[in-house]
Image: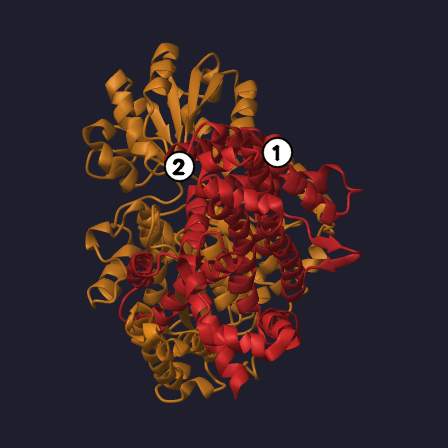
Amino acid sequence: MTSLSTVRQQVLAGIDSHLVRRLAGPLLILLAAYGIVPLVADQYVIESLLLPFLSLSLAAVGLNLLTGSAGQLSLGTAAFMAVGAYGAYNVVLRLPWVPMLLAFVLGGIAAAAIGIVFGLPSLRLRGFYLAVSTLAAQFFVQWVFTKFSWFSNDNTSGVITAPQLRAFGLVFSEPTARYLFCLTVVMLLGLAAERLLATTTGKHFIAIRDNELAARIIGVPVLKTKITAFALSSFIIGVAGALWAFAYIRTVEPHGFNLDRSFQILFIIIIGGLGSIRGSFLGAAFIVVLPLVLSRLGSAIFGGIFDSGVVEMCQRMIIGVLIILFLILEPDGLAAVGRRLGPTLRRLLWRQ
Amino acid sequence: MNEALPLPRTPSHPSPTFFLLFLFTFIPMHTHSLSRSFIGRLGSASLASLLLLGGLTGCGSQKQAGDSTTGSTPTAAAPAGGSNLDVNLKEQFFPLQSYRVGPYAAGGTGFFGGFIDYLNLINIRDGGVNGVKLTWDEGETQYEVEKGIEVYERLKDRPNIAAWNPLSVGIAYAMIDKVTQRRTPLITINHGRTDSTDGRVFPYVFPLLLNPYSETSGIINYLGTREGGQDKLKGKSIVVLYHGSPYGKETIPIYELLAKKYGFKVQQIEVPHPGNEQQAQWLTIKRINPDYVVLRGWGVMNPVALRTAQKVGFKADRIIGNVWSNSEEDVRPAGEAAKGYIAITTQASGKQYPVLQEIIKTVYDKGKGNLADKNRIGSVYHNLGIVNGILNVEAVRIAQEKFGKRPLSGDEVRWGFEHLQLDPARVEKLGAKDLFHSINVTWKNHEGDGRVTFQQWDGNKWNVISKWIAPDWALLRPIIEASAKKFAQENNIQLRTEADVDKVVK
């Protein structure tokens, strides 16, 4: 991974500068995200790019814990998002004294509970068989929210308008405010996920992914670890669903959390890089941003000649081809590209 | 706004810095051993697109004045050359969140095609509305909420937006907050949030012509006339076959209410989405053997219902389709099984109406029509788009009478919609006699008392088989008001009074 020369440099540069180097990147990104983006980005960029990017990134981080790190394939991501969103909505609605942040946590816990239930088959099933049983979660949850209108407060058309975001006595209604709120939640949970992978539980995840039998033999508690993986992953995905509903779309409906969304998030982690937190963000950027860029570019160039449908079709084809090429040429995802780029960038930055 | 029109803004495309970032991510790859790999090529590809974009921003600012429509409507475009700096630019802009791709493309192309055709007709034949050209720009939504929002955010800063017309309940819901803040009307013709009919709570939302409750009442009233009087409904039995979605379930309480009122028996059976297997449901129906089946379907569920009905031997002329089961696309795939099937509509299909003849003559014969397939002219969705065009344009015209013949603000157009009263005589003058009946929107009633009619499929086309029927609005109004009031309380909305109607923001 790191070439010999960079290792030598790191040793030579000493601990301090090593730390500085390691933290410089993340700190710069954080600085840009908190300091520069809110000042520069207009409403369009925040509402249509950054908010979906952040919520899908978080969902991808969650799924990556389960699928990327612990090796349990899941197709129920959108369902867990829906449980998070509906859970948070119902807590806010029915227990008005609960602060909204806590409602998000409770939404996440509800998702975790459902995640555990649908994670139980993972004790017996593996791979595609497990994927099919998580698919059941997808259909079941959507059905429940459509069938029982209690969840949507008996709203006639079944679409809920999400209440305004509030926390710490502040109202986050402006796009910039919602962005900062989202960013903070995503950052904290992302950091937690990153740290989790460094703990024993995290190592257990990887052990089970790499070889379940071997893991069992060396004393990894397989049952407990798998359930933990499902619970933690679903918790994060549930919070992501609440963010999606409260901070981004501002409405909640079962249709918004369909199988397509599950696939979308699965593609994010495949393209971004399985088992990599950074990959979740890169993949989300790819899936959210690239189609928009392509279709905007397409309609800017061809808008007068073809109608929007043709342009959209071409954009889909290009994205499809790109995904296939990515899978063939870079199976480890964007995160692997990033890893290779890292040293190069650092050299460029620090040598001169 | 009149004397100092805001200059068209710089494109709201993602700024070039965005592309630069994208590019720089990949440039260092060239120094790496992988430079000849796919990633390297991706880098060069993005370099190429950056160059393209550079060229575009050069000529792009000219394109920006709200007319990607130049291709289809030369008259809609401003005079050539730097014209968008002209402060006298007289344009009224329609942002279109259309869907021409995806599972609902048939409806989207027809509806937005009809809408654009009518706007084109007004531009070409009349030179716009009192000299104000109509312009538009399309963004593809695929019927998905987040794409609809993206298009909204992209187009919302254009000058002189008249109204939004997403033709999607999900997108409309997500926009209610936003359009209310920015004071722009949101039109949800024949669909939308039922309680937005109450203009006291939803000043900017207009479910024109028909909301789901009125549709239900219209269907029952039709069955009553068919039986020879509402009192004859007593003891009849009706099955409602509904799509397993919030949309499908929305009218359940209304059917129950009407059943109680008229004394018929109603049984409501769900078909899970998408509805491509209905054997069990139709066997149940066969066993019940009701007098009528109301089909509250969506997409593939409709033709499958008709085919399965034929299989179990239930006659098509006893099946009544609702407003989303009433198009050619719903019956054609069912072939022979659809013959005799009846469906509700707010706008008759066919191209015999003067306004359609003018569209064919003025727009299509000059090669400027929006539908790729001319056979779809006069189809259900196309005519719905045309009626939607008439309602939008007339609202603008009515507002112009009040505020002056110039491009209007969204709030001024809202005033126009709240005074959108077209009686049958006016409808005839517009060349739409028998195409739709009339509309009577007030500040309180945002639906506007649209009449419905019923059409029967003869295997090739729809034929109107009923008079214009009025739903029982008085019965439904209290339910709508109660629901709107609940929304107002949840969201701390002050009920509007009549005095607020004329408070218009320029």
Residue B130: where, in percent of width, then height? 44, 73
The answer to the question of whether label 2 and label 1 lie on touching residues, with beta carbons closer than 8 A, is: no
Chain B palette colour: orange
Q: Residues within 10 Å of mark 1 (few under 14, many from 20)?
A: some
Subunit ID for the residue under disc 2 = A
Subunit ID for the residue under disc 1 = A
Instruction: Specify whether B316 is left or right of A148.
Output: left
Amino acid type, mark 1: Ala
Look at 42% across and 38% down and name the residue there.
Answer: B452
The quarter of the picture where residue B459 lies is top left
Location of mark 1 (residue) = A113
Instruction: Specify whether A80 is left or right of A30.
Output: left
Q: Residues within 10 Å of mark 2 (few under 14, many from 20)?
A: few
In this picture, is B346 found above or below A181? above
Which is more N-terminal, label 1 or label 2?
1
Which of the two residues, B374 or B102, is positioned nearer the viewer here?
B102
The quarter of the picture where residue A159 lies is top right
Look at 38% across and 57% down and name the residue there.
Answer: B429
Amino acid type, mark 2: Gly
Secondary structure beneath disc 1?
Answer: helix
Which of discs 2 and 1 lies nearer the camera? The answer is 2
The reply to whether residue B420 is in sight is: no
Q: Which chain is red?
A: A
Location of mark 2 (residue) = A127
Instruction: Specify whether A251 is left or right of B360.
Output: right
